[in-house]
Amino acid sequence: MQLITRFFVLFALLTLALSAPTAIPTFGAVRTHAAANATTNSTTSASDNSTATSASNNSIAASASDNSTATSASNNSTASQLPSSTPSSPVGATVNNNSVSALNKTTQMSGMDSSNGTELLLPDDDPFYRAPNNTGDYKPGEVIRYRKVRSPGYITNLNGNISATYQVLFRSSDNFDKATAAMTTVLIPHNANVTKLLSYQNIMDSSATKCAPSYTLRLSEASQPLEIVESTFLQAALNEGWVVNVPDYEGPEAAFTVGKQSGQTTLDSVRAVLNLGDMTGIKEPPTVSLWGYSGGTIGTIWAAELQDTYAPELKIAGAAAGGITPNLTEIAVRLNNSTHVGIAFSALHGLSAQYPEFKKVIEDDLYPEKREDYMKGKNMCIDEVAFYNQQDWTTYFKSGAKLLEHPVVNKVMDENSMGKSTPKIPMFWYDGPQDDIGDYNTITKLMEDFCADGGNILLHEDLTARHTPLAVLGSKDAFSWLKNIMDGIGMKDGCRKESFLSNALTPGSMDVFGEQLGDRLVQMYPQIEQNQGNTAL
């Protein structure tokens, strides 16, 4: 393994030195969505051949097994129950066989189940995702309903360390503290150490609900190298015995780049996992850590900023974040005319989902002949927004680049940029001056501001890696740091920066993930380099 690692180091440095500065492969949940608009008359149920049970009689409904039929939560119910604090008979939470069957005759479906080859309902068509009318009666983090689903195939195909997978609909809040119903996916390993919980915020980077991890994790295969890389991180955490939480932190409307909601949804998803009780085996408050890269840092860092005031009861040991995206206005300017510019289109749609006044300004300013192409981005995942590669987004708008100076646009973008409060938990950051998405000067300024206010941050500065390669190169140090804080080995107080020519040269090796998974990451790296420029990230 050490010989392979040495080869990895030399190969990484050579490719980073020779590769073009704007050619970046994707890192996130990407796949072919060609079937997304195919209409079907299938009667496939909302879960893997199961439907959500009704949540009445102070119980939260769950499907009894992967192949179960719908069961009402009555006195004769086989539905799992949680504490009676759940609001009685939630309106809109009941789904019966007839309604599911009727819905399935007209809904659109996309994607194949990861284990049995059946088609899955898209989130917008799946009754399980629907918020009950009385969502506001639930407390933040309280479970509305849950179901057991088949474990993600492309995660388990290496060594299969998932005992059970649950999807959980829970109460959270948007940027304006309005009640929402958000989703998370909970992965439980064999022989779980239920004293430790990792919340992993993946790179969704999309304003389309079909790109949410609760849906993409259930698909049969990963279609991009860095998606396999990300699944390797999840498997490594499961091999440590950690329970793993993967929230749809953008919320039910896929409000990409909406900061406060992303942070609150992340924190409420952790609360929801703890509220599952017997389903996870967690009985005492566990040690919690957070991890996210690129777009995943929006949920991660905003959660860290908000934790002290929004969820002070959570025992969060620390958070790891890399490829940080602090300031939305800067990113919109920085990505223009690049292979990453599609992310800017997704951000505009994401903010529009939460701010009607923002949406009106944006869409009123569109040139009529550009409207159709602009609107396509609303339903695109990170692979699909490569449609916009190297375009000038300012040519879509009558105001051009001055659109960013509009009072509404400027206010909304500032409101959703990081740095509103200082995290009280330890943090590990990995980034560098060659990051071609986030501006490194702004990243280090954010760190300085946090540190001046009592923050506790260790920054590993990679001097050569660009944004996507660093997702792999910096991961071993991030995971090592997470393992230490989960084991109660704290970092030094205060802030410090450690600089490296490449994170490939830092002490340790990819074996921190285990030899088999470490080899997998090493083998994936050349594919990541070869795939650069094919997608928006």
Image (tube, rainbow, N blue to C red):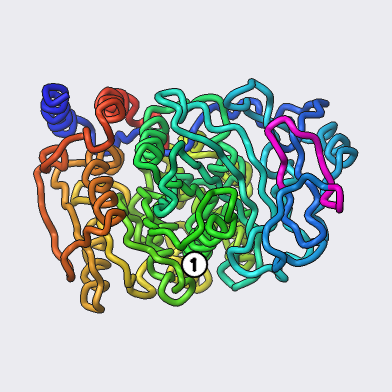
Quadrant into which the N terminus falls: top left
Residue 380, how many percent across, how many down? 56, 40
Q: Is residue 73 above or below residue 13?
A: below
Find out whether residue 64 is within the magenta segment.
yes
* Drawn side of residue 292 relative to residue 492, left or right: right
Q: Main secondary structure of the magenta part?
A: loop
Q: Residues within 10 Å of mark 1 (few under 14, many from 20)?
A: many
Which residues lie in the magenta part? 62-76
For the point 19% across and 62% down, the residue is 491
**Mark 1 highlights which residue?**
260
Q: Is residue 371 above or below residue 422?
A: above
Find out whether residue 75 is within the magenta segment.
yes
Can residue 512 be seen at all in this image of the molecule? yes
* Drawn side of residue 57 relative to residue 500, left or right: right
Q: Is residue 481 above or below residue 358?
A: above
Dot 1: element: helix
For the point 37% across and 56% down, the residue is 289
Residue 226, how many percent across, how many down? 37, 33
